[in-house]
Image (cartoon, rainbow, N blue to C red):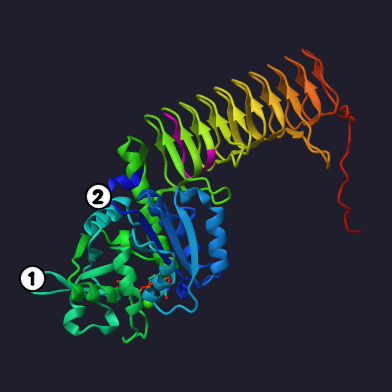
Amino acid sequence: PPGAQTRSMNPIDIVIMAAGKGTRMKSRIPKVLQRLAGRPLLQHVLGQASALGARSAIVVTGHGAIEVEAACASGISARGQFDLKFVRQEPQLGTGHAVQQAAPLLQGDGTVVVLSGDVPLTQPDTVRALVDACADEALALLTVRLPQPKGYGRIVRGADGAVCGIVEEKDATDAQRAITEVYSGILAVPARLLLQWLPRLSNQNAQGEYYLTEVVAMAVAQGVPVTTHTIDDAVQVAGVNSPAQLAELERAHQSRAAAALMEQGVRLLDPARFDLRDDARSGARAELVCAQDVEIDVGCIFTGQVELGEGARIGAYCCIANASIAAGAVIHPFTHIDGEAAGVQVGEGALVGPFARLRPGAQLGRGVHIGNFVEVKNSQLADGAKANHLAYLGDATVGERVNYGAGSITANYDGANKHRTVIEADVHIGSNCVLVAPVTIGAGATVGGGSTISKDVPAASLGVARGRQTNITGWRRPAKKTAP
Ligand code: UD1
Ligand code: CA
């Protein structure tokens, strides 16, 4: 189990404080359900519990509790193997009061890790190092050096460098405010110690809140070692309080994802204009798997599971969700590909776009061409088939080397049911045709431009279904009346 990666022998129980209102988000959605990379903040934090191999995670809810609990229950993917529990904190009387609510669910044999539901980007290695610093006996604090420590609790150390307490900004003296080592809000402590300390917290401070940070002074008074794990990366402990902070952390997360891809050899033309998100509809985790020599131009958004084969090139400003794009395929700019649950497959060397739309169940063979303003849904196009301009293929089976003319569509829906169109190999469909399904166009047949085809066309024949052309010789256009 991942838990074996820490030196801690105790089982790990996570307490996630998630009762706060998040007033500055100015949103009806509870703060911890706001999304970063398509995933609720709280799911990012629950990911820590999985990474640590935790025994349980206890989420302390308050504002929007019903919604938060429901969202966790449905987003099971990030839950991993641990036992997920909820406790309510009503009203919210501070971080110490929040953890007090979880106390009845804590077992004395565990190590407790306290996290905040609105701090999404802490790296698993960081939390592991903190658990190691606790080593089943100490109170371990994750601290961070911040040049601008305003608003944070300051780590107060004695002459010997040992921690003597945490002082909140509002309770601090001027000298203490100058301290740049701050408490991240994340700690690890043996449950047996925490359970002794929690009932003794007071609210005698500037904010009249029960501060969890008061346990530090209790540990010191009792001779329990207080250890720290200190990092310089403020992003890992940054909380989300406003839309601007959420956007900042989104960018930090995306640059990490971009850097990891570049590390594997993926060529991103601008890592600052790259996005990879979970699929909020299915909860599917974001995963972009790239073979060698993949090139991705600026402004692309990848969602859910996407695979890019060797040498595949993605043009600027494409949105690609749940799709597999084979080697050598080129997706030209502004193409929208969304496989939803059924997926989309683009074959080797296919050319798609610009401005194309591939919907669920689109399966393109090798060397298929899909041009501008062409929509494909639940259709298989065999190798070498082409639909280059302004067309719709829905519920169709298209054979090899078919040429599907500009402006042609499959009328696949009769108002009640969907029907299939079968276009066999080497068919040539002229421009502006309507193929009224169910209908089959036999191999090698031709459909004349402008036809509305509602009966099968036999192989190797020409199907035409439109008014015959009439020419009236010497036709005179109406002339404008002249004033008398
Ligand atoms: C807390 C720390 C401070 C630290 C800072 C890091 C205390 C007293 N102070 O500050 O030292 O530098 O975090 O961000 O702990 N919450 C509840 N119930 C409550 C109060 C808060 O669930 O009654 C939740 C919030 O939703 C949030 C988290 O706890 O997710 C932290 O609360 P917040 O108010 O942001 O922290 P501070 O008290 O400002
Ligand atoms: Ca507070």
Q: CA distance from mark 2 to mark 1?
A: 27 Å
Q: Closest to the observer: 167 or 301? A: 167
Q: Which quadrant does the C terminus fall into?
A: bottom right
Residue 312, quarter of the rendered image: top left
* Residue 407 image point, x, y percent: 71, 35
| Eye-nearest disc, 2 or 1 | 2
Secondary structure of residue under mark 1: loop
Total numbered labels: 2
Query: Is residue 430 among what the camera can see?
Result: yes
**Residue farthest top in this picture:** 460
Which residues make up the magenta segment?
A: 311-322
Going by the numbered disc 2, the residue's amino acid type is Arg
Of residues 232 and 338, the one nearer the viewer is 232
Q: Label 1 CB, ligand 1: below 8 Å?
A: no
Name which residue lies at 69% across and 17% down: 425
Q: Position of residue 459 (x, y in %)?
A: 78, 13
- Is 26 placed above or below 252 here? below
- Ligand 2 image-quadrant field: bottom left
Question: Is the residue 289 above or below the residue 226 in the image?
Answer: above
Q: Which residue is mark 2?
A: 7
Q: Is residue 203 left or right of residue 31?
A: left
Q: Which residue is mark 1?
A: 160
* Depth check, front residue: 109 or 166: 109
